Structures are given as structure tokens and as C-alpha cells.
Amino acid sequence: QEPRPPPRPRPRRGPGGGCLDVDFAVGPPGCSHVNSFKVGENWRQELRVIYQCFVWCGTPETRKSKAKSCVCHVCGTHLNRLHSCLSCVFFGCFTEKHIHEHAETKQHNLAVDLYYGGIYCFMCKDYVYDIDIEQIAKEEQGECSVPGLGEKYPTWETTKPELELLGHNPRRRRIASSFTIGLRGLINLGNTCFMNCIVQALTHTPILRDFFLSDRHRCEMPSPELCLVCEMSSLFRELYSGNPSPHVPYKLLHLVWIHARHLAGYRQQDAHEFLIAALDVLHRHCKGDDVGKVASNPNHCNCIIDQIFTGGLQSDVTCQACHGVSTTIDPCWDISLDLPGSCTSFWPMSPGRESSLNGESHIPGITTLTDCLRRFTRPEHLGSSAKIKCGSCQSYQESTKQLTMKKLPVVACFHFKRFEHSAKQRRKITTYISFPLELDMTPFMASSKETRVNGQLQLPTNSGNNENKYSLFAVVNHQGTLESGHYTSFIRHHRDQWFKCDDAVITKASIKDVLDSEGYLLFYHKQVLEPEPEKVKEMTPQAY
Amino acid sequence: MKMEEMSLSGLDNSKLEAIAQEIYADLVEDSCLGFCFEVHRAVKCGYFFLDDTDPDSMKDFEIVDQPGLDIFGQVFNQWKSKECVCPNCSRSIAASRFAPHLEKCLGMGRNSSRIANRRIANSNNMNKSESDQEDNDDINDNDWSYGSEKKAKKRKSDKNPNSPRRSKSLKHKNGELSNSDPFKYSNSTGISYETLGPEELRSLLTTQCGVISEHTKKMCTRSLRCPQHTDEQRRTVRIYFLGPSAVLPEVESSLDNDGFDMTDSQALISRLQWDGSSDLSPSDSGSSKTSENQGWGLGTNSSESRKTKKKKSHLSLVGTASGLGSNKKKKPKPPAPPTPSIYDDIN
């Protein structure tokens, strides 16, 4: 018995009622006039030359010659949708129909648009897309890159198998406002609320979500069933499946216990510690390192974890004698902030001052995240009991130390040090810290250091630099005491919707609920992503 | 609109502004055209509508926002019956009890060593009083009750009442503290190591001699300083089971038990350990690794010893990138478990 051929894809009806019946197996139809053009041996090469010289100029010479010579042969304009005839050397503008006149006169049916490379057929009176010509065009466009502008980001195009699949399956779900796709509860396996919160935060990190949902992970581990990145990938599929029944993350727990032995054991644990351990294992497994033996330099690691979470923390130690500065830059995955009232910190500045920088609630007496960050990046006199050996003085001198951000990560995680266990006391600091929905990290960067005069922060006059702006997308909260408590999280889903995740129960939350919460771990995502040339293949530049 | 070369110098502001305006308008029109082409191409190639969703199927996923219900419209707290399959032992476990189960299953719980020893004892001939102890233990170990109860029952019938070993084990009973002492094993019988899992074996070798007798092919269950075997033999057996990096745990001489019988103090130590011990099993060696990573801004582990059975929230330590301070309670070298716990409790 013959196998049944796959069903013909049903035509989709768009909002305008237009109906397109495209056989996805074959591709776009082109037209008969294009087919007549594609004869002989030379048409490919000739077409390539046209693309290289007149459309996508890859060299300074071709760019110059295009600017000089590509003008309408009738009216001399270089605008008005200039086209080049495909059969002879003629440039004509579209708007004034000069190219149309040429086509009719010479019976040359095809012309190429010099701006975007589309092929226009004068007989069909429309732009046509022929699969072979499209292929050549794609190649030529790819070859052309303008220095300083980086690689052109191509729009997503489906591959043939994807087109077929989509055509056969018209019932689709997407992450959209007021739908549950992308949200799912997590069962508490026995004191594992700390893990559930971190999972919710990670699976709602936009750039990480995009990486895993587009199936970018290629397993490098010797045994994939032990790969935490593969398990993460599976977790994304589970959480974005639309399944309303909460997921049981037992495999994740098992893998974490195997790979981060210090966390193994049935007991309440710290969410921050779990986050760091999980990132570490994920980072190792991205490179196939399952025993933690490979000494990898995070400055040169290109795994998705390092691309997203690794920032550079600069430490400047200034010798008070010779004023020489010794600088080191350490990679960091998070910033841990001391809170007022803790015995280890000294809090010289009055809270509330200048905290309108980030639009935080400017209530006197309320400490803000910005206050904490300012304290974190202030120059600190190390004192006579902590002298540093100065390289130029060749002796031990008193010095000041200052921390600033040299390189900002795509996702910034802030950790409030609420659990205090010094010799004096062990307690949880429950002081409310106000944190903003949007955060500008510019004042805390190494480049902003020079603006400090006598320890006073000079606010930069132009904080409009979008590169350093972040949006809050997840908050992990702890209720209870140091000995015993419960973790819950708020996560942001689809722009401005917030949800509270309490293990298996997900409920809608307001922005006010989020911003009024105590805050233990805060996750911020860069608003604008500038892909660097060598990393563009890994990252997709889209945030909220 | 002929294109011509012109010099920008000598032009007044209004002219320059007009030129700038012109260029700007060209760029905007250019961008719009590009967008139009994208749409046109997507429509003609048939993929413009591909990401449309089917409104009927999306209806099932609308968010619910009502008190007492989650976003899926479900009532809270109905997930007690969720189960999962343990990757280690392949048994079906209630999801909310998975973590405590896994701890025991991997042999890293505070009771794992005791359970392992009990199973070992079960695999040999037991006397009646020992099997009575089994029932008490089972009450405390819900996860193990099913499996071990069965085993215990089985072993009872396997006992050989005429075994020459039995009289010796009766003698031991007199030296022990009380019947409720859970930490019982017979010093004179050995252990069949084939029945042990790797975690149990590892755990065992931290507290017992372990040298395999040539006659019985069983492991010696006496203390780490038992006079019948040498340290060299003990090292060899550890290397045999655990690999070339295995070490012989050190024992403090003041609490050593050299003789056949367990002394009262050692039994007391053992009992104290199981009531509230710190997790100083070999799995803790992982925490020393985190300290190496301080430069990464990683938090270091603080493994607090649990004084009571109440579960404590795990403490987070100062883990800034500058790596200040650490509050580890871990001793520099890992001694045999009974030893440190006595001092912890006294403090």
C-alpha cells in the first residue's frame, strides 16, 4: 500500500482577507518572465555583478561609483526608487516611471531595485520572488558589511521544514498578553522553595528564554543525561508548554545535588547561594566540563551564561602616599549589597538624598537601591590596620579602595545581604529597601568615577545613555527568620504583567505589590542590547 | 532633482537646515520602503500569516484573576498527590517528599550510615533482640519502611540458630548501653560488601575498619583502629573500593576503641551523633571548592551543624566579589563522625 502523501497545507487567511496558497515544499513561485531570464550560463554571474556594484556595495570603491553613476538616465535623480534594468545598463527611477518607459520600449521585462534588491517584473506588474535569485541575493547581501555598523541583523526566515510544519499546524500558541503561556507553577519537593524561585527568575529572563526556546543549546557533555543545560532546556519547554498543572522539578534537584555537592541535602537553603551554584554548573556544562576541573577564564568564556550574567567589577586601590592606583578587574555574576543596620557596614550618608535619580520613592528615611549602590561604589579608606604594599613606594601604605562596574552584564542581579551572622549577632535584616522599575547604572560605572569630587557624587548631566539602562523583571523575596522561612518570587511576563510565584501557585500581582515587597534578590535586564560582532550569532537583540 | 556637487561652506543656516531636512526625509522614506518590502515579500512567499494564532485554541489559556484561584483557574493546594520517579532507585515517590527521599537514597542523610549498617547487619545472621530494634527504627524512616521491613522479615527466617557466632553477639549485648540504642552492629560478624551500594560503602568506610577477611570474604566491622588489621590493609581496601584518591579517615586516639566490645562512651557518642549531627559526610568536601571561587563573587557555604531536628534555613555568607570573611564551621581535616559531635554538643 502506498504511503499517503502529506496533506496540502491549508491556505491561511490574513486579516485583510487575502489568501495565499503557497506550496511550502517548493517555495515562492517567481514568474514565467523570470524563468526566461534564467537561461544560459552567464545569468548568475551577471546578476551577482549587478548586486555587488549597484545594490549591496561592499567596498569603498563600489560605494563611490554607485554614488556617482547610479542616477536616472532620464531625469538624473538618485532618489525616487531607482532601478537598474537587468538586461542592459540603464538606470531609471520608479516614481516618475522612467524605468517603466525603458522596459516597454526595449521589451526588457525585469529591473532590480537599487535600495533593497527586489526584482520587479513589468509584465506581472509586481515584485517577484524566485527561489534561485533569492538565494543569490542573500549571499551577496551577506558579503556586504559596512564597517562601524556591524553585521546586518537578518529578519527571521523560516527554513523549508519549518514552513511545512507551520503550514500543517494552523493552531498555534504564542506568548501574549493575558494568556498563561509561559507561566507554570513548580512543586515544592521538600524545602525547595529557594530553588523554585530561582527557576522562575531564570526561565523569565528574556534573553535566556530566547536562547533556549530557539533551541540553541548543543550539548557538549560526555553524558547528556547529566547535563544541567539540557535539563534547563527541558525546563523551558515544560514551563512554556501552557500546561496548567505544576511541574515537578525532581530531575533538576538531582542534577544540582550531583554537580554542586555542597548544596546537596534536605534542608532549607539560601536562594542566592543556589543561584550562584546553578550558574556555575550551567557555565561548566556549556563547555562540557562535568567535573569542574577545567580552569576556565571567565573573561574569555563565550558560553551563554557568561554572555548574559558576567559583569566586570573594577577595584581601584589608591596609595595615599604616592597616589598611584592599582587596578584589577574581576568577573562577577552578582552584586551583594550591605544594608543599613548591619554591623559590618558603615552608613555615612543620610538615606533618601538624591535618590530621585532612578525614580525611586523619595521618602525621607527610606533607603533605596541607589543608596546601596552608591555606598558600594564609594571610595573607602582602608585604615591604618590594613595597609597595602604599594608597588611604586615599595612599602606598606594606607590606601583607599573603590569598586565600580567596568563592564555591565546583560542581566544584573542584586543581592541584599539580609542574613547577618557575625560574632555579635545572627539575625535577618528586614529593613525595607525601595527599588525602582527602571535603573540607570551609569553613575556606578568605572567611567563615571572621575565625577566624584571629595567623595560627593556629581550626577552626570546627561544620563540619557540608553546603554546602561535596565528594567526590573524578577524579584525573589524571603519571609520568615534566619532559621526558617519561605521564598516566593515575582516575575514579569509580557511587558508589564507581573505574577507572584509561590511554589505551585501562580497568581496575578500588581506593580505595587512588587515594588512594596521587601526584596532579597533583584533581577534587572538591559533595555537595549548592542550585539558585538563576534557574538551576534549567539544573541538576539531584543528585550522588552 | 539632478544631483550635483556643491560645497557646504558659504551656505547660511537656513540653507544648511533645508539640506539636512532633505536628507532626513530621504532616510525616513527609505526606511518605510524597506518595511513595505519586508511585508510584501512575507505575504508573497506565504509566511506572513504564519505566526497568527488560532483564537479558539488561545481561549483555553486566558489568565484567571480571582481570589482563591491561581491564574489557571485552579484551586490552591490540590497537588498533594503529585509523584515522580527517583532517578537513583527508580521508585515512585510523592513529589513533596522527594528531597528527603533523595537525600537518603544517595546515602548523604544523617541517618544513612546507620541505615546502611542496619542493612548490612540484616544481611547476616541476626539474633532476635536485634530484629526488635529494626521495628523501632522503621518508624523513624518512613521512606525506608517498605523496603527494609521486608528485608528484616526475610532475614529473620534465614537465621541459623546454631551459628557459632550467636553466642558472641549475645556477649556484646551486655556491654551496650540500652536496648533503644539504634547504633548496633555485631563486631564479630563481618559485612558482605556485595550487598552495599557505593554511597553506603563510602559511608561505612569512614567509621569502620573495612578490611576484607580472607576466610569469610567479609569486611571487618570493628573500629578504625582495630588491632587485628593494619592501617596499610585499611588503606588498601579503601583504594580498592573508592579509587586511588581514597584516604583513611583519621581517628583521635582519646576516643579510640581498640577492643572487641564497644565501650559505653563510644555508644553514647554514636547515639548523640544520630540525634543531631552536622553533615560532615564526604559530600561536604564540595564546600571547600566554593572557597576557591571567591574571586568570582560566589557565596561560600556555611554548613551549620544542626543542634535540633528542626530544619534551619541555610545561611548565606558574605559573598561579595571582594571576598570578605567566611564563617565555615568545617574542621580542617575530616575526622570520623562520632568524634566532633561530642564537642559540638558540649559547646
Image (cartoon, rainbow, N blue to C red):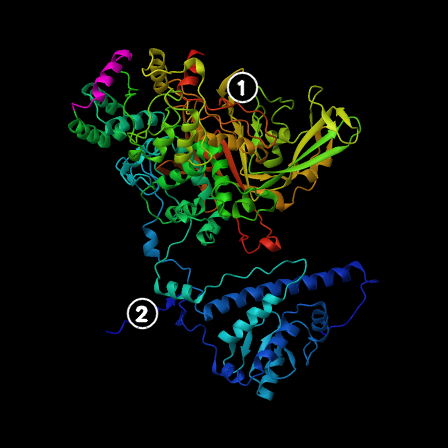
Q: Amino acid at mark 2?
A: Pro
* Gap between marks 1 and 2 measured at Cα: 70 Å
In this picture, which residue range is highlighted in magenta? B161-178
Q: Residue furthest front?
A: B215
Q: With respect to residue A92, does A446 lie above or below?
A: above
Q: Quadrant of the N terminus of chain A?
A: bottom left
Q: Which disc, if any, is residue A422? A: 1
Judged by its main secondary structure, the magenta piece is: helix
- Are the residues tagged 1 and 2 within 8 Å (C-beta)? no
Where residue A345 sits: x, y (%)? 60, 22
Q: Nearer the viewer, mark 1 or mark 2?
A: 1
Q: Chain of mark 1?
A: A
The answer to whether marks 1 and 2 sit on the same chain is yes
Q: Amino acid at mark 1?
A: Ser
Q: Residue furthest right?
A: B10
Classify residue B125 as left or right of residue A330: left
Residue, disc 2: A7
Q: With respect to residue A433, does A445 lie above or below?
A: below
Q: Chain of mark 2?
A: A
